[in-house]
Amino acid sequence: MVWRLFFVITAIIVLLMYILGLNTDYSSISSFQYFTGELAYVCIALILGVFYSLGWKQKLFSKKSLNIFIAVFILSMVLSIIDSTVQVYSVFYKQAQNSIQASIASVIVSSGYAVIVNLFFIPFYIGLYKYKKNFDSLAQVEKTYWKIFVFYCITMLAGCVVSSITKYTHFVLYNIFDYITILSCIYEIMFIIGFAWNVRIFNKLFWQLTAIPYVLLMCLIPFFISDTFNQDFRIKEIIFGNPISIALSAVICIVFIYVIYMYAYKEKD
């Protein structure tokens, strides 16, 4: 029960962090920072996956894949500390105009940041130990990596929906393509969950009729969203901002097309 609680609490915290982080000026974010941020989302999927596995007694990670994810987690931690050190150094150097003082201050602040972050990760570290200890007793399930992909995507999709309704006062100023984008987030949440957990949400005909229009709209919508909507969610900056964001957006788009194709036309009821 406690691990299910950790799963729910972590998902809510991540959702709130995503909502608060919306409207960031992505034009000022470097490729390194963007890459570090995306690694952080992979780590969030890992954390949610471990809590889910322990809470529902299901084996989402093999021993090999868990070790790979742990390596990614460590890399993400190292890169985030490096990024924070660089950011803090630039701030202190502007104030003191002394490289030695700025270096010392940046190391101290970044070390404190690393300690505080790792304190928050203590439940996760315990969860990793429990997962490895109870590995053989966890039930084997299908589509384990798709479930982890859901954990990666769902807070972002849900965050867009919640923010569009609650965070911004000019919801009424959006155009038809903006509203379709919001509805498509709900649509995507349904089919990726349905596909990953083998659950038929609505009947198969509904998905067959809507799959092709969804794919066409997904490819066209970024070019027709309003300036107001883009100001709120920075869609164009996220998709076209830098080479990493372009590549990631293309990969996610292809994955979503594959999932809706499988869910609408190939999966059995």
Image (spheres, grey):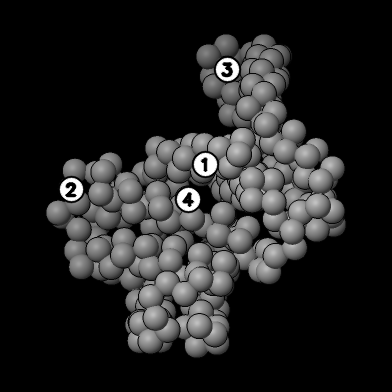
Q: Is residue 101 left or right of residue 18?
A: right
Where disc 3 sits, the SS reads helix
The local crowd at label 4, few if under 14, some if 14 to 19, many if 20 or more residues have their Cα within 10 Å, is many
Three-letter amino acid code at disc 1?
Val
- Tags 1 and 2 touching, CB below 8 Å: no
| Relative depth, front residue between 35 and 55 | 55
Distance from label 3 to label 1 (Cα)? 38 Å
Residue designated by label 4: 155
Residue designated by label 3: 92
Where disc 1 sits, the SS reads helix
The local crowd at label 1, few if under 14, some if 14 to 19, many if 20 or more residues have their Cα within 10 Å, is some
Three-letter amino acid code at disc 3?
Phe
- In front: label 1 or label 4: 1
Distance from label 2 to label 3 (Cα)? 38 Å
Q: Give whichever of discs 3 and 4 has the lower sequence position.
A: 3
Residue designated by label 1: 8
